[in-house]
């Protein structure tokens, strides 16, 4: 009986290694909260009236450190009551993934899913995204908004951004 | 008793390895990098099409999707956007185990991670690569921004 228990203990230990993976050490995964991003003129730009990007694809992306939560605020959408319709979050291990190749090697990126980019809606024009992993990433967002709450509200937008 | 214990241990290890993602690896040459042809760059052999001025798709959703084998990819070229110097600002790659995911009983999902690695992006052009050992079919939808020289890019 004792031997059987020992075998089970070994099996449990084996299971813990491959499925648990490497954990977080010290404070590396506590994460921080940064933002709001999108209020200043240099923070993001409009692709079109209903589409906004955090940075252009060829520029330097946002630092999406392990555990970090970015809060975003797009004032004109908030004033117009435009709800976020879709969020495409692209992540890369490189801060400028579309930079010219180094030593013939290109960096790359992919669309995030799962806990790489957890989105929380905070209200029209406001949301946050968390990197709920222990991996250092860089982030680029493309967000699309629904129609204004009432016609003409969007035209009153008078923030620092150019729409 | 001892034989039974050993058998139990083997069974436990087998179950654990099976459950923890060890999965089947690549055998023989199945994971060697394959071809990465250009798609859409030849005006006399148009591939893909513009849904509207700002949106392009490799194939229609109900048409046969592109083969997307393990360790292969495509350089997607949207000639009108190249000519207009328009950056690709949004990209979505949908994957399926079937070439006709819209057919009854089939399905698809948006790809991410190393099943869909984007790189080498420039105006009207992007490279997509399947860095896994799984064979898929892919449909890519791209959206363009305003021309780079219109001051949007920086």
Image: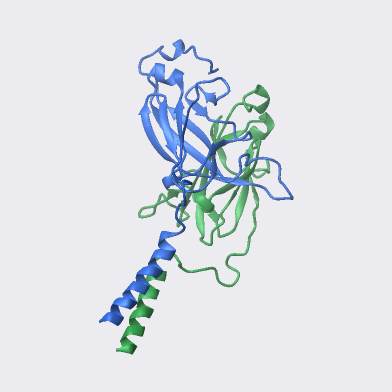
User: Residue A52 or A25: which is nearer the viewer?
Assistant: A25
User: Residue A11 or B138: which is nearer the viewer?
Assistant: A11
Q: Position of residue B39 (x, y in %)?
A: 63, 47
Q: Position of residue B123 (x, y in %)?
A: 66, 35
Tell me if B39 is positioned left or right of A135 in this view. Answer: right
- The hue used for chain B is green
Task: Locate the N terminus of chain B by quadrant.
Answer: bottom left
Determine the residue located farthest toward the front in the rendered image: A26
Question: Picture quarter containing residue B124?
Answer: top right
Residue for point 65% across, 23% down: B151
Can see residue B22?
yes
| Residue A9 vertical position relative to residue A145 in the rendered view, above or below | below
Q: Position of residue B98 (x, y in %)?
A: 45, 56
Tell me if A6 is positioned left or right of A69 in this view. Answer: left
Determine the residue located farthest toward the right in the rendered image: A103
- The hue used for chain A is blue
Residue for point 46% across, 23% down: A74
| Residue A115 vertical position relative to residue B55 in the rendered view, above or below | below
Determine the residue located farthest toward the left in the rendered image: A1
Task: Locate the C terminus of chain B by quadrant.
Answer: top right
Q: Position of residue B46 (x, y in %)?
A: 63, 42
Callout count:
0
| Residue A67 vertical position relative to residue B143 in the rendered view, above or below | below
Residue for point 40% across, 17% down: A80
Can see residue B142?
no
User: Residue A48 or A73: which is nearer the viewer?
Assistant: A73
């Amino acid at each position: 009986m004792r031997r059987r228990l020992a075998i089970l203990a070994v099996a449990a230990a084996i299971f813990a290694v491959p499925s648990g993976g490497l954990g977080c050490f010290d404070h590396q995964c506590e994460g921080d909260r940064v933002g709001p991003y999108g209020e200043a003129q240099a923070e993001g730009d409009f692709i079109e009236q209903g589409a906004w990007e955090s940075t252009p694809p060829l520029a330097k992306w946002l630092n999406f450190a392990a555990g970090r939560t970015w809060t975003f605020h797009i004032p004109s959408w908030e004033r117009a009551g435009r709800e976020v319709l879709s969020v495409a979050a692209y992540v890369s291990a490189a801060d400028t993934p579309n930079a010219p190749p180094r030593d013939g090697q290109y960096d790359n990126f992919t669309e995030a899913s799962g806990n790489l980019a957890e989105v929380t809606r905070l209200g029209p024009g406001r949301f946050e995204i968390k990197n709920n992993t222990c991996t250092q990433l860089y982030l680029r967002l493309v967000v699309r908004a629904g129609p204004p709450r009432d016609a003409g509200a969007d035209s009153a937008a008078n923030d620092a951004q150019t729409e | 008793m001892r034989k039974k214990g050993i058998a139990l241990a083997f069974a436990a290890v087998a179950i654990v390895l099976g459950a923890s993602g060890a999965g089947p690896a690549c055998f023989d040459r199945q994971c060697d990098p394959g071809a990465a042809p250009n798609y859409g760059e030849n005006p006399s052999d148009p591939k893909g099409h513009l849904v509207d001025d700002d949106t392009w798709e490799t194939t229609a959703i109900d048409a046969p999707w592109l083969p997307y084998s393990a360790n292969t990819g495509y350089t997607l070229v949207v000639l009108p956007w190249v000519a207009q110097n328009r950056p690709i600002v949004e990209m979505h790659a949908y994957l399926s185990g079937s070439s006709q995911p819209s057919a009854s009983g089939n399905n698809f999902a948006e790809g991410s991670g190393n099943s869909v690695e984007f790189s080498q992006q420039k105006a009207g052009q992007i490279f997509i690569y399947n860095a896994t050992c799984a064979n898929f079919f892919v449909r890519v939808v791209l959206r363009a921004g305003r021309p780079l020289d219109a001051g949007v890019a920086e």
